[in-house]
Amino acid sequence: MGMAPDTQTAPRPPAKAPAARATTAGEFVKSVGLRWDTAVGALLVAVFVVGLGTTDGFASGENLAFAFNDIAEIALIALPMTLLVVAGQVDLSVASMLGLGSALTGALWNAGWAFELIVPVVLLVGVAGGLLNGWLVTRVGLPSLAVTIGTLALYRGLASVALGSDAVTDFPQTYASWAVDTTTIPGTFVTYPIALFITLAVATAVLLHSTAFGRSLFAIGAQEEAAYFAGIRVKRFKLILFVVTGVFSAFAGIVFTLRYGSARADNGLGFEMLVIASVLLGGVDFDGGKGTLFGAVAGVLLIGVLKNLLTLNDVPNEVQVIVTGLLLVASVLTPRVIATVIERRHRRATGAAPES
Amino acid sequence: MNQPATGPAPVLALKDVSKSFGAVRALRDVSLQLFPGEAHALAGENGAGKSTLIKTLAGVHRPDAGEVVLDGEAVVFHGPADARDAGIAVIYQEPTLFPDLSIAENIFMGRQPRRALGRIDRRAVRDTTAALMKRLGVELDPDRPARGLSIADQQIVEIAKALSFDARVLIMDEPTAALTGSETARLFSVVRTLKAEGAAILFISHRLEEIFALCQRVTTLRDGRWISSEPLAGLTEDDLVRSMVGRDLGELYPKQSAEVGEIALSVRRLTREGVFRDISFEVRRGEIVALAGLVGAGRSEVAQAVFGVDRADAGEVVVDGRTLPAGSPTAAMDAGLALVPEDRRQRGLVMDMSIERNIALTGLDRLGRGGMVRRVLERGRAADWAVRLQLKYNRLADPVGVLSGGNQQKVVLAKWLATEPAVLIVDEPTRGIDVGTKAEVHRLLSSLAAEGLAVLMISSDLPEVLGMADRVLVMHEGRLTAEIPRAEATEESVMAAATGRNERAAA
């Protein structure tokens, strides 16, 4: 339609200062919102550089191998968790599934099973747990937060049933060496769990950002009904995500068991919060529909590096927990504070409420 | 400005008001005068500045230049509360009531009359509400919860609320967009009552016949500029359209006759318990079939069951000879079915997503190999359809939510036409979009049908139904009550079937 062409050609008086400032402010908010993941990435680099300058031994190969290997399970689970949160879902039962995987590994090892057989069985249990979560969410129609609070307790309970309060520690060195930080890919400081993580992270990034599946997840998270009306198989996609998350969590249980050489029912207690916190720290919107895998990975690594630096500087564990908590609160708060400040300034400048 | 030489002074006026958002000049030197006892229409295409004007009167926006004049004195509203205290009330298209509170509680929310010890005087609340309803000539039980009220009833509640604030100026922003004919008639009689009591009304509607039916004076905006303010007496609809769009529109309903071909969609005895039953009809290639009826007759529900987003309990849907599995939109799409839903914002589009990604959403598996999405192809698909539908946009990467309603509807159409459907179902394709875009959508549907597409069009807009359809199917309370060929379709015959007066007359 030819909207009166003189709209474009009409001479424009110089823009009023308040209006101009409001625009820049608006764009600034937008750019902050869009680049939150980049900001976390930059913060990660900054913390890394500070570590190099202040802390002896931080940059050594052994320490870096230790630092990254120490968050291997959290990092692994954060990958499918990112997909879930982008799709507007969450899984709180991941750490319990890790515990169940660990307990099962120990119980079956005690029962004399071959380790090669234990792994697929544990992964299958992960599939089953994910299916239960996914079924309750997609078929019964319950919110994922409520469902997985329930299965958080359920899976941890099953872990205790499987192994009681025992600890199984007699795993042979051959298996343990795959997970510990003293065994690295020759010539690098990259441990096998981290190598696996890097591979999976690249695959997940491609999946989320360059495939039809990934696009669909963003649509589901942003507006589920519109996605459904566009012919996207919303329920199937959600079910797949819960199953993948279950498998990753159970697998993380095996890694955890081997890394510490100890299978216990209470392994990884509370890890779900660290996983979700890392993902949110990386700028993935808890309401779904927004976020990048890069951001989530940067969030995980930032928490790992900080934890390591604090340990190296003999900061007691309780303080570390407080620092991590503050960081997370700040990450949630900062974008909002910036937005509010700019909105106030905008309002003062123009005397108008923000455009809705 | 042609202010009447005699008569009352304006109660509320805008004088040379300008307002910009960044580089966008929403209003330039706009003036408007509202007189007591008069209904004033505000006309203009989407994007003409109507919303900004309303928000300026309502105290949401403060003008960059010019002034708001109340009872002859310039005033500055610092927020909506100031405007409300000055006696200005705005009734929006979709009211926002608290669903779990009663009608009376909604009206007195936050300022309930109190008894001793601060207890709410429920009787006073209820009695005052009943009195308000009586004054409006409407029967609504004050104790009824707002949940489940029709949009029409919710608007009445909002009007009652405005009255309880002693509003002297009532601004109504497209109040009739979602109303049925009888609901609109009731609303108009309420508005006439208020007018007779001396209230000034500012009325916005895309339906020209409503403007002529209700208002005495009209102000037209185009591209943020004031075009005219004049009495409606002596104007024709064509005159008004011309001043809104700045040129002749040609025909609003450019129906081309098309060659009617094979049966593309066949619906047989489709039933969904408690919603609709025994629905059978066919749509042939090249045909536009309208599905008419009152709101709540089950038309959208039939469309959703045909497309598979709702599961039918019985009956079958056949597209080009293929029977569809029940309850699978994906299978329906594969068979060549497309549904442009009524609710654009919730179902038609992902509002936060970009234009190109919205258009890509229906064809993700065709934008690359092995499940990958190639951005070049994604952008190409969007750019192609943006040109074909003359979409007005800034960048394809902008969120679709920044577009005007008409352009959003074009994106929904693009997203579905890109699937190259054999059958296109459109549910209220022009609701809430401006006259210019409306004519474009009609032209598009007509030429698509001419190219052999089968179109099923649900519409509550009777002129649209009569102007566009080759055949009219009419539903009443979940059943098909008539099938009327184009030649015999009139407002009377369609309304008779829609209200159930000619049960089974032509079926």
Image (cartoon, coloured by chain):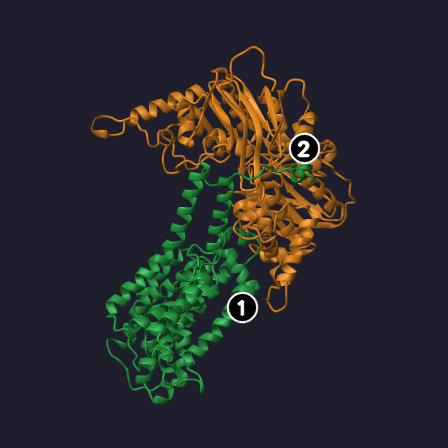
Are there few (<14), some (14-19), or many (20+) residues within 10 Å of tag 1? Answer: some
Q: Residue at x 36, y 54 (%)?
A: A333
For the residues beneath circles 1 and 2, the answer to whether they share a chain is no
**Residue drawn at the location 49% of the way across and 54% of the way down:** A31
- What's the amino acid at mark 2? Val
Q: Residue at x 24, y 26 (%)?
A: B115
Between B32 and B261, the residue placed more toward the observer is B32
In what element is the residue under mark 1?
helix
User: Which residue has dot 1 on it?
Assistant: A206
Residue A14 as seen in the image, left or right of residue A28: right
The hue used for chain B is: orange
Residue A92 location in percent, x, y? 36, 63
Which one is nearer the viewer's eye here, A145 or A355?
A: A355
Q: Quadrant of the N terminus of chain A?
A: top right
User: How many numbered badges does the structure rendering display?
Assistant: 2
- Mark number for residue B245? 2
* Vertical comparison of B396 with B409: above or below: below
Q: Secondary structure at mark 2?
A: helix
Task: State the image quarter where residue B233 is shown.
Answer: top right
Q: Colour of chain A?
A: green
Q: Amino acid at mark 1?
A: Val
Q: Is residue A51 above or below residue B186?
A: below
Residue in the foreground of this view, choosing between B236 and B505: B236
Above or below residue A180? Residue A39 is above
Q: Residue at x 60, y 40 (%)?
A: B428
Residue found at the very far top of the displayed protein: B6
Image location of residue B132, percent across then percent down: 40, 22
Circle 2 chain: B
Instruction: Examine the image and state in which quarter residue A306 appears.
Output: bottom left
* Label ID, residue B184: none
